[in-house]
Image: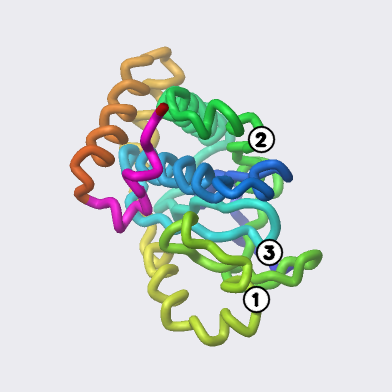
Amino acid sequence: MASVGTALSRGIDMAIIDVKGGRKVWMIDRGLELMDLIVSVVRVIFEYVGLVNNAVIFDGMNGFKVIAPLAKEVDNEEMRSFVNLVNEVVNRSMKSFDLFQAYGNDIIIGGNTMLKVRMYRVPLSLHWSTKLSAIPLARVYDFLTLYADPSSVIRRLETNRKLLEPLFARNPIDSLIDNVNRWVNNDYTLVYYIKGAIRNRIKHGVSDAELGIDRENLKTE
């Protein structure tokens, strides 16, 4: 597994949210559908706080990562609060959906890669255990293990390059810090504003293709 960190960096210069599925989610027919929903919501949160240059990458094993490079370093406490904000918004946004009610407990949304490991998988590198590549994705719902096979990666290099382009531009952090401070200061209206942005995006479908949101997947019972 090829992982890297920023030389001489003391803070965090890459926002990374992990979305990992347990055995149950990977075995059921609608497991990818659920992870697609959650990853899509995480990307809306990223966009809301100003991290518009982001990408989704299969981690080579059991989940996906939403990644956004930052223009300046941010400290651990601020990013730990950001992870907590993401969890709160995902849970509040998804709690009415049947899939989340049934299998949401089998998915972990966290920031260990960003906060603890502090080493970031090189896109397209091989996982030491599965021998699968860490490939970028336009949409989790369309993921097939076959795409992460090294032979497929070679055939899809141009597509992968385009999907990785957002990572070439770093995101300003002012809006991120402002929203994290609101969350730390118990401004819970922030959660409802972001929920509104999620619902509005889904309702009007303005950027469904960009964010990978499939409105048919978001029906509730």
Q: Which residue is mark 3?
A: 3
**Looking at the image, is 173 positioned above or below residue 168?**
above
Per the image, label 2 sits on a secondary structure element best described as helix
**Mark 1 to mark 3 CA distance (whole Å):** 19 Å
- Residue drawn 40% across and 53% down? 71
Q: The N terminus appears in which quarter of the rendering?
A: bottom right
Q: Quadrant of residue 3?
A: bottom right
- Residue drawn 47% across and 63% down? 137
- Count residues near mark 1 (Cα–Cα under 10 Å), then give few for <14, some for 14-19, many for 20+: some
What is the three-letter code of the residue carrying label 3?
Ser
**Mark 2 to mark 1 CA distance (whole Å):** 25 Å
Residue 106: numbered disc: 2
Q: Is residue 130 left or right of residue 179?
A: right
Tag 1–tag 3 contact (CB < 8 Å): no
Earlier sequence position, callout 3 versus callout 2? 3
Asked whether residue 12 appears in the rendered view, the answer is: no
What is the three-letter code of the residue carrying label 2?
Asp
Q: Position of residue 117 (x, y in %)?
A: 70, 48
Highlighted magenta segment, given as a residue range = 207-220
- Residue drawn 43% across and 82% down? 158
Q: Which residue is mark 1?
A: 149
* Residue closest to the eye, 74 or 152: 152
Q: Quadrant of residue 185?
A: top left
User: Which residue occupies the extreme right position in the image?
Assistant: 129
Per the image, label 3 sits on a secondary structure element best described as strand
- Residue drawn 56% across and 32% down? 80
